[in-house]
Image (spheres, rainbow, N blue to C red):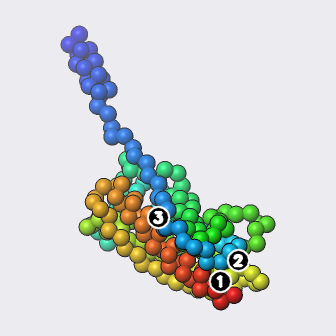
Amino acid sequence: MKTLLIVLMMLLGGCAMQSPSSQFYVLSARAPVSHPVASGLLLGVGPVNLADYLDRSQIVRRDSNVRLRMDEFNRWAGDHGKNITVVLAENLANILGVEGVIPYPWSSSLDLDYQVLLDISRFDAKAGNLVVLDAQWQLFRKRPREQLLQVKRSHIETRAADSSHDAQVEAQSQALAKLATIIAAAVASSAGND
C-alpha cells in the first residue's frame, strides 16, 4: 500500500510539472515605402538558399565561432526560407515603390524584367546581441535575353535591443531591410540604364 501511494504521488507530481511552452516567430518587412523607381517593373526574388544550419525550425544563436545553439522552445513559425524570401520581396517592393515584386516560386508565364538569387551563409545572433547576415546575391536581367548584371557579397550587422528572442528577430528583420536597400539600389541603377 505504501509503495502504491508513493508511485501515485510521483505520477501526480510529474503531471504537475510542465515543460516550457514553445514560442513562434516570423520576420517582417521593415523598409519604408518610397516613390516608384520604374513603373511596371517586374522583379522575381529567389530562390533563396540557406546554409544547412539555418534551414530548420529552431532559432539559432552563435555561442562562439564554432559552436551554435539551436533553441527547441523558440522556433520559426513555418518555413524559415520562405519567410525570408517573402520579407525580402516586401522590402524590395516598398523601397522600389512598385507592386511587381514576386517571391519565388512564381508562374512560368510571368515575363520578369529582373531576378535576384541569394545564398545566405550566415544569419544568426552572437554575443553582445549582434545579428550578422552574410549573403551572396546575383542580379539578372531577364529581358530581352537573360544576362548576369552583378554578383555581390553583403555583410550586414544589426544590434538587437537586448538578448531576448523578440529583439533578435526584430534585429534580423532590420538586417533584411538593409540587404533589400542594397539590392534595390542595384535594381534601380540597372532599370535606369535600360
**Residues at marks 3 and 1, CA–CA distance in whole angstroms:** 23 Å
Q: Residue at x 74, y 63 (%)?
A: 107
6 or 158: nearer the eye? 158
Q: Position of residue 135 (x, y in %)?
A: 48, 75
SS for dot 1: helix
Q: Is residue 40 visible?
A: yes
Label whose residue precedes the other's in the sequence (3 or 1):
3
**Residue that lies at the very extreme toward the right in this rendered image:** 109
> Can you tell which of label 2 and label 3 is closer to the viewer?
3
Q: What residue is pinned by disc 2?
A: 113
Q: What residue is pinned by disc 1?
A: 191
* Mark 3: few/some/many CA within 10 Å (<14, 14-19, 20+): some
* Mark 1: few/some/many CA within 10 Å (<14, 14-19, 20+): some
Label whose residue precedes the other's in the sequence (2 or 3):
3
Residue type marked 3? Arg
**Residue that lies at the very extreme toward the front in this rendered image:** 35
30 or 153: nearer the eye? 30
Residue type marked 1? Ala
Q: Which mark is residue 30?
A: 3
Q: With 8 as the anchor, is 151 left or right in this view?
A: right
Q: With 23 as the anchor, is 180 left or right in this view?
A: right
Q: Residue at x 51, y 58 (%)?
A: 80
Look at the picture and state if 130 lies above or below 188: above
**Residues at marks 2 and 3, CA–CA distance in whole angstroms:** 24 Å
Task: Give the quadrant of residue 18.
Answer: top left
SS for dot 3: loop
Q: Which mark is residue 161?
A: none
Q: Residue at x 32, y 26 (%)?
A: 15
SS for dot 2: loop
